[in-house]
Structure formats: C-alpha cells, structure tokens
Amino acid sequence: MTRRRRTKWHRRGTAAADVLVGFFSALVAASFQLLLSFVRLFVQKIAQTSRKSETCTKRSVSGGGRNGSGANGLRRQFDPATVPTVRFDSVAGLTSAKAEILLRTVYPLHHPDKAATYKVESGGGVLLWGPPGCGKTLLAKAVAGELEAEFYHVRASMLIDQWVGEAEKNVAALFRQVRSHSRSVLFIDEIDAICPSRRRNGSTVMRRVIAEFLSQMDGFDTAAGCRDGGFHLTLGATNWPEALDEAILRPGRFDHCVFVELPDADARRHIIEQRLIGRPIGDDVRVDEIISQTDGYSGADVANLIETAARRAFLSSLQSTNDDRSISRSDLMESLADTRPSVSAAEFQRYREWQQKLSAPQSV
C-alpha cells in the first residue's frame, strides 16, 4: 500500500513538475520575445536619431543646397564666381540696353569725380526684363566684367526653402555675403519667383520673404559704406514683369528697368557668324538669307538653329563615305523649317506694352 501511494504521488509530482517546467519555459520564451522587441525598437530609435542628426549636419554643412556654409555660421553659403571675362563687346546687339546700363551704372562708377560734379547718382538696382533667351544673364556678367567685380549669380531655387523661416534667413545671408566684398554685383535670376505680387499671392511665407528682400535692398546702396571706393550693385532678371510685387519697382530698389529685346538683324548676324566659326561651311550658305528668315527669333533660337544644322551634317557624314561633309544650305533650311520662334506674336506685343509702362521709374 505504501509502495502504491509512493508511485501515485511520484506520478503526480512528475506531472506537476512537467507543468511547472512548461510554464517557466513559456515564460522565458515570452520574456525573450519581449526583450527582443524592446531591443529592436531601441535600435530603430537610434537609427532614426542618427538619420536626423546626419540630415541636420548636412543642412548645416551644405545649407540644404549646393552651396556649403562657412565658419561664419551662416545658414547658407553663396560662393561668388570669379570676375567674369565677358565685356559689353561680347554681347551681340542690345545697343540701347547697353547704353542705358553704361550711363546708369558703369560710367558713374568709373568716373566718380565727374559723377559727383554733375550729381549723377549710381544707386538703386537694375531690372533686366524681356523675352527668354535674349541675353539677360550674359548682359549681367558683362556688367560685372566691365566693373571688374565679384559676380553672384543666384536663382530663386537657391533661396526658397521648405522649412518655415529659412528662406528669409537665406536672403539675409546672401546680402550679408555680398556686402563682405569691396566690389560686387548680385544678379538674381527669375526674381519674380522671389518677389511675386502680394496682391495676387496670398502666401504668408512669400510675404515674409518679400518683406525681408525689400528690407535688404533698402540698405544695399551702390557706394555708401563700401570700403576703398568700392560698390555693391544689384541686377534682377525676369520674363514676367507683371508678376513682380509693385513695391520692388519704386526708386531706391529696382528703379532702372532695362528692356532686353529680341536681337535685330545685326545682332543675329553676329550670333550666326560666331556660331559658324571653326565649322565646315558649304559654298551655298548665305548668312543674309538666314538673317532674313529669323526675324522674331531670340538669340537662343538662332544659336539652336546653327547647332541643329551642324548635327544634321554630322549625322550625314557618319552615314556616308564623305568625311568632309560641310554644313550646307539645305541643312540650315531644314533646321529652320523644324524650328519656331520661342516668343509668339502675342507675347511680343505684351512685352511692347510693358516696355511703355516701365519706360519711367515707378513709385509705390
């Protein structure tokens, strides 16, 4: 009887032990899974923190764009190009535009004593406006080249930022850096994207950007405060003058509006001859014929016409045994038939209307 009871209790004890062992095994497994989940979560948090830190580091180093920041702690660094080698002689046509810029900016700075005698001021900014592809950027480089000044070429995309408040800081940083030079020319391309009309644009972000830009321009005099007889000059470029905020056109800001129009016959001749230099040209090519058929073309349109004809001749030379294949009249005529002026008649009329409207300085 005693042996049976012992066997019975032994079996019960073994079963209980099995239950306890199973329970503790399950508990350990669950604890391990829970611990593993915590470890994974911890690792993910560390990785996210690391990525955020890396992003912040990149933003502080590169300024969120292609320009790196310096040791001065600016949000964004805008590095100037070297003094351009382009001069007004390199710009085809645009005789009236060049004459106006020379009178308002270059001559007073080159002859400060005579300018002072006649009380001719050189302050304020210059707005270059007109159809696309007519040489506004080249003209701005020529101004910096004539003045032997550091040239800043800034686009709207380099200033606008996705983070609230950063665009205003970028604008302030830009003007601060331009002022750090004794002689500098700031050229802002597509300025209508930075200073759009506040009457048409309800964005509070752009309103702050415009306000900061106007504030910086008010203190950005051409000669005052510059060391060693230096100067700071602001140039803007736009294809849409009607999109600009009205306040930017008042005296002291962009009070000089220069119309950069489509190239005339002489300018087109200069562009065509320059593009044909060094290329094999057929005896049947007549430059006057090309000029007569490209009325209304922009400078970029004329340059593209020559490039297209050259590619036609190049491809033809690859497909034939004639290695000395020249650019022929037919190449130019076929290219001319395949291209159209980038500025329509309606757009040209719009520019003419704005030329009359902006012929005199406006105040707001």
Image (cartoon, rainbow, N blue to C red):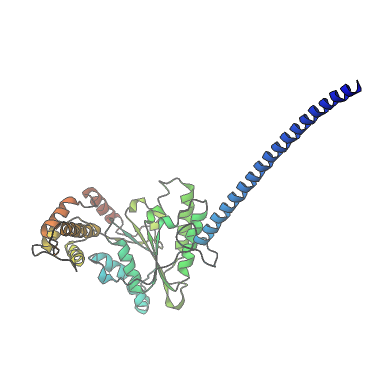
Image x and y of residue 37, in percent: 65, 41
Image check: 351 left or right of 123? left
Quarter of the image with the N terminus in it: top right
Image x and y of residue 260, in percent: 27, 60
- Tell me the residue at 14%/53% (across/down): 334
- Choose between 323 and 96: the one closer to the eye: 323
Q: Is residue 191 visible?
A: yes
How many numbered discs sit on the rendered protein? 0
Residue at the extreme left of the image, as rendered = 284
Q: Is residue 11 above or below residue 199?
A: above
Image check: 4 left or right of 71? right
Image x and y of residue 95, in percent: 23, 66
- Choose between 337 and 356: the one closer to the eye: 337
- Choose between 326 and 287: the one closer to the eye: 326
Image x and y of residue 297, in percent: 20, 56
- Tell me the residue at 18%/51% (across/down): 338
Q: Is residue 294 visible?
A: no
Image check: 37 left or right of 21? left
The image quarter in which residue 355 lies: bottom left
Residue at the extreme top of the image, as rendered = 1
- Choose between 77 and 110: the one closer to the eye: 77
Quarter of the image with the C terminus in it: bottom left
The image quarter in which residue 156 lies: bottom left
